[in-house]
Image (tube, rainbow, N blue to C red):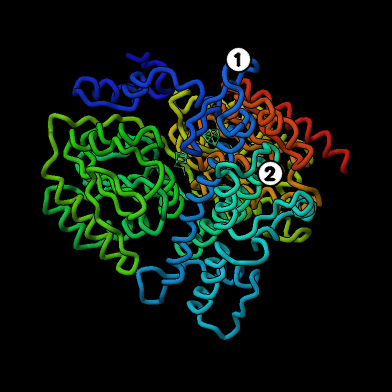
Amino acid sequence: MSDTKMVSLDAMDEQLIQKAKQEGVETMWDRKVTMKAPCGFGEKGVCCRICAMGPCRVSPVEGKGAQRGICGATADTIVARNFARMIAAGTAAHSDHAREIAHVMHLASKDGNYTIKDEKKLLRLAEEWEVKTEGKDIYDIAHEVAEIALNEFGKPFGTLRFLERAPEPRKKIWEKLKIKPRAIDREIATIMHSTHMGCTSDAESLIHMGMRTALADGWGGSMIGTEFSDILFGTPVPRETEANLGVLEEKQINILLHGHEPSLSEMIVMASQDPELVKLAHEVGAEGINLAGMCCTGNEVTMRHGVKIAGNFYQQELAVLTGVVEAVIVDVQCIFPSLTPITDCYHTKFITTSPKAKITGATHIEFNEEKALESAKGIVREAIENFKNRKQDKIFIPKTKAQATVGYSVEAVIKQLDRVVNSQIDPLGTVKPLADVIKAGVLRGAAGIVGCNNPKTQHDYGHIEVMKKLIANDVIVVTTGCAAQAAAKAGLTSKDAAKLAGKGLQAVCELVDIPPVLHMGSCVDISRIITLVSETAKFMGVDNCDLPVVGVAPEWMSEKAVAIGNYVMASGIDVFLGVLPPVTGSPEVVDLLTNRVEEMTGAKFFMDEDSLKLADMMLVRIEEKRKNLEKLG
Ligand code: CUV
Ligand code: SF4
């Protein structure tokens, strides 16, 4: 059996893993042991299954074994093609999410289930996209803006609209490199085409194309996802919540929300407050309905409603093991198929809702956006009716939970910054205070710490250790995704955590009244981070790559994370990876990513499986950037 000490930072995880063993329930840890060491060829990225002459696996070591696939593809080609396809898949996932949200906005109406919650933000976007607003009904504007967004996916000409938001020098770099993404779907299709058997074999060209596709995610799909979700469901403001499996309630109906798209989770939040359903919950003997979020949909609803956070990616099985979850409701992405066998061991209903993500053995209740609330109520009802089926002898809720402050949209951050602005001298509503403290060195820099969990590392260890080290060194941390949930569980997103920060950051936290680690939302909300960095760069008259800012994914695992890494890098921000991507079989690709891309984009990748070493590298890089920034004046 695996050494469980390696499993998690959190003793509670281990208690549940022990419970699983006692009850004969299989978890990812058992499967990890069965899997043994990962396939060496796959790990290095040198296995090609792109055509049926293969699969071909070539040797990463020169002179040993096959050096070329049957078609003659080298390790460089194979690695770069595989990597580019990961970017395409990740971009597809984020962007298809965004497309769903844009459709929902197209459906929004005054008396419907989906309404416009942030009219100001909609009007700002309408102006940005040159949609006439005068004398028009807000819903007509919304529909027009939604249609423009939907066209961003397939327009035949031009490049993406949101690219205009970037600092001028950044736009010039993209222009020069010819990596301004055209329509989002087109960039994904181009990668699939170019990586088809017998198309591009040049690694550099593939990395190039990969950047363009990734930018279609960051400045396309993800940004549309965030902006439209804010308009529809409200732009987040700071609020209090709690995080970790201890938020599950023994006496209540527990519904676990897992997946990504707020169009579903928002409706479940509404349905869970429906008086009739609350009454029904009481009738079946429960004290109420308790929603708990997991992964990114959890982030969406905690940012906007303070819904408690059950945990992150790696805790999806553990949540079920508590024996008190009436239903796990999922839509798309990051959902373990093992939730079927594991929910079968308890009374838990595993409900899939999206035709894009049907899971064998799950109960599929298709979510219908046209009758959104009705659909959501049906789903919640299923959970309530399942309460009676709990197996009393299988209940164990760990006590652990932490207080967290969440909800830091860019707008919310700027509003906090306004607290220190002397409005007689400076205008409100700008990033000036942030630029000032960075320039003065009170804050040495900023880090965006994002991404998943990965059993290649101890659960949450990378996230937490890197965060602690950075804040202690006066680097402010912004976070999204499962990294944000790790931070919340560890108490780092509470204002109290300022005591762990260096003197400079501590002072900033006190003056501005923020925690040292800011929860900015879900993975698509990395677009918030990109926006904040770009606004700061523009304000200071420099490019993103001139700022002492780093992007970090200590425990990433998904293809989406590969897309993110590449758009962050192509946006001029260094990316630090705590899990090696499958590229090490090609010295050429490794050299491109960790070295040569810097000449092109002003940023590059750093990779190291030792998180603390990684954090040291960040601090060095931040200081380097500071020196250069000084020279820029
Ligand atoms: Ni979209 S992609 S495990 S939920 S952060 Fe969490 Fe975030 Fe990775 Fe998935
Ligand atoms: Fe082998 Fe080339 Fe076919 Fe890949 S594309 S499987 S390397 S023959």
Residue type, numbered disc 2: His
Figure check: 477 above or below 146: above
Taking the image as drawn, is residue 503 in sight? no
Query: In the drawing, what numbered circle is on residue 208?
Result: 2
Say what secondary structure mark 1 lies in. loop
- Residue at the image position 55 percent from the left and 48 percent from the top: 192
Give the vertical position of 627 relative to 31 (above or below): below
Q: What distance separates the C-alpha of mark 2 from that of mark 1?
A: 29 Å
**Residue 4 located left or right of residue 382:** right
In the depicted view, which residue is nearer to us: 196 or 483? 196
The foreground one among 91 and 577 is 91
Query: Tag on residue 547?
Result: none
Is 224 left, or right, of 437 in this rendering? left
Q: Which of 562 and 321 lies nearest the eye of the viewer?
A: 562
**Residue on which the image places disc 1:** 64
Looking at mark 1, is its residue's CB closer than 8 Å to ligand 2? Answer: no
Q: Residue furthest bottom?
A: 135
User: Is 352 placed above or below 343 here?
Assistant: below
Badge 1 crowding class, 10 Å Cα cut-off, few under 14, some 14 to 19, many 20 or more, is few
Horizontal and vertical percent for residue 615? 63, 25
Q: Which mark is nearer the camera, 2 or 1?
A: 1
Query: Mark 1 and mark 2 in contact (Cβ < 8 Å)?
Result: no
Residue 116: x %, y % from top left: 46, 69
Front residue of this view, candidates 433 and 274: 274
- Residue 67: image location, x then y, percent: 61, 23
How many marks the image carries: the answer is: 2
Q: Earlier in the sequence, mark 2 or mark 1?
A: 1
Residue at 64 percent of width and 30 percent of height: 76
Tell me what residue is drawn at x 48 percent, y 32 percent: 54
Type of amino acid under label 1: Lys
